Image (spheres, coloured by chain):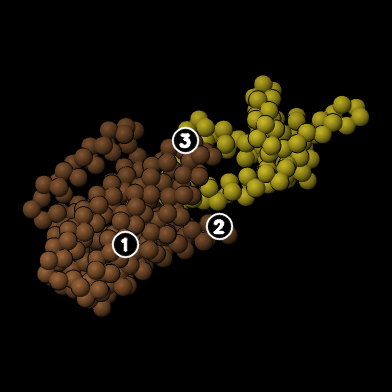
Chain colours: A brown, B yellow
Amino acid sequence: MSTIFLSPEWFFKYNILFEIFFLIISLIIATFALKVYRTTGQKLAKYFGYGFLLISIAFLTQSVSTFFVLTKINTQLCAAMQASSVASIDAAGTYLYMGFMIAGIVTILFVSLKSNTTRTLWLLLAASLIAIALSRNPIYTFYLLASIYLAFITGHFIAYYLKNKKIKTLLVALAFLFLWFGTFHFLISVNREIFYVIGYVLELIAYLLILSNWIILRK
Amino acid sequence: MSEKRDRITIMNDMLEFIRSKGDKAKPTQVMYRANLSHAMLKEYLTELLEKQLITEQKSKDEKRTYSLTTKGFEFLKDYQQMRGFLESYDLT
């Protein structure tokens, strides 16, 4: 059970850079959504903000655990006895990452479903976390569930764009489309290192689109 | 759309109108433009004054006019961004 060991060795340091970039963008979106909620009282903005906040926490846990594992690897003192502790740090980081990330995606899914009751959110969240925790292959289950949820979210934003054809709605639809591609890509990247890198690049495109939309809104 | 959001939209309309009138508008003009009853106008003006988004000026013949404060202009600027944000992510 590990994410870092899915990654090619040469990509280790870039992993952290990508994660920090994703962390910053998702934190910006979360902060602004929560500011909008405070001013307008719009509940969807509140849940959307919480969704991105959970995603940013997921990236934070992953980058911290990746950094910790990498520094252990680089010390050359990582003897066989220490290898198990490195593996457990990575496993803990991966579980935290999956928990926070799926919670964030589920919250955004809840927003896109426009459900009137928060029971929908709790049901989706409980079912997802239990499915991942009890799975024989938690990483695979995580990416499978994340792909399904992102497919729904992407469908929602594409339909919204078709109804409301503007640059900003197009950027959001494309961003979620790339996020979905990226997540789906991780699903097939197990044992294929280069696909793992491509997954990150697709996510990078998604976050750049989210950033572009943010810049357009700020002008 | 929640009740509070509608409230914010009305406040935005009132502030926009004051700005469009050269940053000096009479209460009756604001009332008609924002399509409010007299009681509601009073309530909203009180809120805008409390939030320091507008200031009140009285002429010698006791006629009142309203102007935007720096905070009021900032609200209008942020409001466009906030509305843009809500629209882009279908959060309305």
The residue sitting at 25% across, 61% down in the picture is: A183
How far apart are the alpha carbons under marks 1 and 2? 28 Å
Instruction: Please determine whether, in this image, residue A109 is positioned above or below residue A61.
Output: above
- Where is mark 3, residue-wise? B1
Instruction: Please determine whether, in this image, residue A52 is positioned above or below residue A207.
Output: above
Question: Of residues A106 and A97, which is closer to you in this image?
Answer: A97
Q: Secondary structure at mark 2?
A: helix
Q: Pointer 2 indicates a residue of which chain?
A: A
The numbered mark, 1 or 2, whose residue comes first in the sequence reads 1
The lab-note entry on whether marks 3 and 1 share a chain reads no
Residue A114, image x and y in percent?
35, 39
Q: Pointer 1 indicates a residue of which chain?
A: A
- Amino acid type, residue under disc 1 in the picture: Ser
The residue sitting at 57% across, 36% down in the picture is: B8
Q: Secondary structure at mark 3?
A: loop
Marker disc for residue A63: 1
